[in-house]
Amino acid sequence: MEPKNDLLSRRQWLGKLTVPAMAVTAAALPATALAAPHQKNNDNLRGARIFNVRDHGAKGDGKTPDTKAIQAAIDLCNKENGGTVLIPAGDFVCGTIELRSNVTLHVSVQGRLLGSTRREDYSAGKGVPPGNGNIVFIYAVNAENITIEGRGTIDGSGQAFYNGKGDNTGPGQRGVGGNFDRPHLIVFYQCTNFLVQDVLLTRSAYHCFRILKCKQIQLHGIRIYNRVNKNNDGFHFNDSQYVHISNCDIQCQDDACALFGSNQFVTITNCSFSTRWSIFRFGSGEAQNIVVNNCLIYDTYGCPVKISSGKARIENLSFSNIIMRNVTGPIGIAFTNTSNRNNATDNANDTTSFVRNISFNGIRATVVEKPVNHPDIAFGVNVFDGELNSCITLNGVGNAFLENISFTDVHVTYAGGGTKEQALKRDVPQVAAEYFGVWATQPFGPPAYGLYARNVKNLTLHNVRFEYEKADARPAVIFDNVHDASVTGLSAKGSVDAELIRIINSKDILIAATRVLTNAAAFLQVEGEACEGIVVNGGDLRKALKPLVFERGAGKNAVVMG
């Protein structure tokens, strides 16, 4: 159906004049000016017109399928060199829609694009690769200059597609038997220069917003509420560059801001996040030059910052001014330079892989004892054994080292409750799985309550404070095969059943200005024949019953007390 033109036609224009005035005007104007006065104005507005979907036959009654009408408006807008496709007030039910270059989709404040509840109304996006499914509600491929804006709603009706099954892409699952036959809310693939702002994105049947191999991305003021199905991600990036996210509010069921593959030049600021699983999740690839600051994270039980990687080139990540409230496993970084993250038996010396130059500054966190189900997620979520009594985990595996990791002005309060049995564990699995995957094979979880670090080079802790709410029998900090570390201004609660700091087969460690906040069996326990170059310089160690303990072949000349 052809659209109604917003401009006055010649007849409408002339009809608004009085007869004498019309006669005078007609006599005064040349014949060429009277030929088609609106055509020239149309040309002037080419690329800036408004295409109301109702003018193309859309009903917006919440029942009639409006897919064809909306697609017709988008196609004409694109053909006319772009403009704005207007979704006015109403509920516009539709299936798969393709956005095109130079089109702004404006969803009015009382307007709602409502996903059909019928699977047959959806299709795979033309040109969208099949990884993690490619059935989709709204998509764009190889497009540029796209905008989605307005204070209205894009609602995927995702609860209609719930069958109790996820996509089974978690650790070790490899997607076998997974549910991929359901629509993502939005997928952009190989698009350039797009803006999404102000809209509410909600109730997707699968991921909310997948951004694949795109460049020049602006995401601002978006609200995501996505908790009706499994794998309800928020933002999900793969191999994208020049990404800028600000002032967004994300509440979802799965990863809130997944950054898989080679995402580079990314800034995320002034956002709030909550999810059952993780917030910032990184996989393999080249994740580089990424800054996260001024963010709030709450009620998140699968690790707010999670890097679980093999064969990766991850560097230059900065996390600053972040508050974490009610989380588990606040930070988990695991790395192996083998092809299999869950098996360190492949000892190929691959020096091209690395995880390095990661900083955490101005972090305040409260860590709960175990995950808690969100009351607005209708289906229960299993709790893994390794999620209990969690800590910050830095886990290099095999011959792989994490490099240049720093924590500055970090204050974490843990629930506590760790046991002596946990503290005695030393056979930490040689796997680079997700943080709870590492501890799941341990009968008692992590052996430290604050920070566990293995295979790390150049580790810095400055002005860090670890404490607990109820008694915890584990050390606050464990270093295992750590080289070149500086610990200055550490304040931590201790236990009468354990040392405050345990150092295993590590070298070149400086510990200065430490405060032992509560009674501890010992300040420092050194273990292993490979320990050397450990210097302790000052601090308040009065509440430690012993200053030093040597175990498991550690020599007394490994430590110098200043």
Image (cartoon, rainbow, N blue to C red):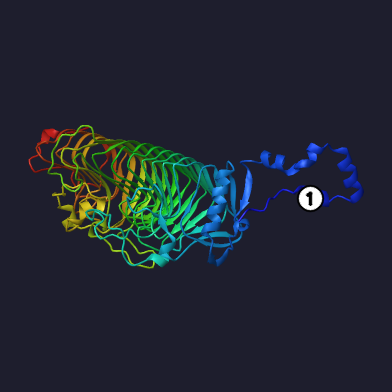
How far across and down, in percent of the image, does residue 539 sit? 28, 38
Looking at the image, which is closer to me, 108 or 76?
Answer: 76
Looking at the image, which is closer to me, 69 or 141?
Answer: 69
How far across and down, in percent of the image, does residue 372 sit? 34, 63
- Vertical position of residue 1 compared to residue 335: above or below: below
Q: Amino acid at mark 1?
A: Arg
- Vertical position of residue 362 compared to residue 256: above or below: above
Kindly state the secondary structure of the residue where label 1 is placed. Answer: helix
Residue depicted at 15% across the width and 52% down the height = 425
How far across and down, in percent of the image, does residue 154 sit? 50, 57
- Vertical position of residue 375 compared to residue 251: above or below: below
Q: Quarter of the image holding residue 552?
A: top left
Give the labeled residue for mark 1: 11
Looking at the image, which is closer to me, 119 or 462?
Answer: 119
Instruction: Answer few, some or many: residues within 10 Å of disc 1's Cα (few below 14, many 20 plus, some between 14 and 19).
Output: few
The answer to whether 552 appears left or right of 316 in the picture is: left
Q: Quarter of the image holding residue 344?
A: top left
Looking at the image, which is closer to me, 48 or 412?
Answer: 48
Is residue 109 in view? no
The answer to whether 405 appears left or right of 218 in the picture is: left
Is residue 490 in view? yes
The answer to whether 154 appears left or right of 281 in the picture is: right
Name the outermost residue toward the right. Answer: 20
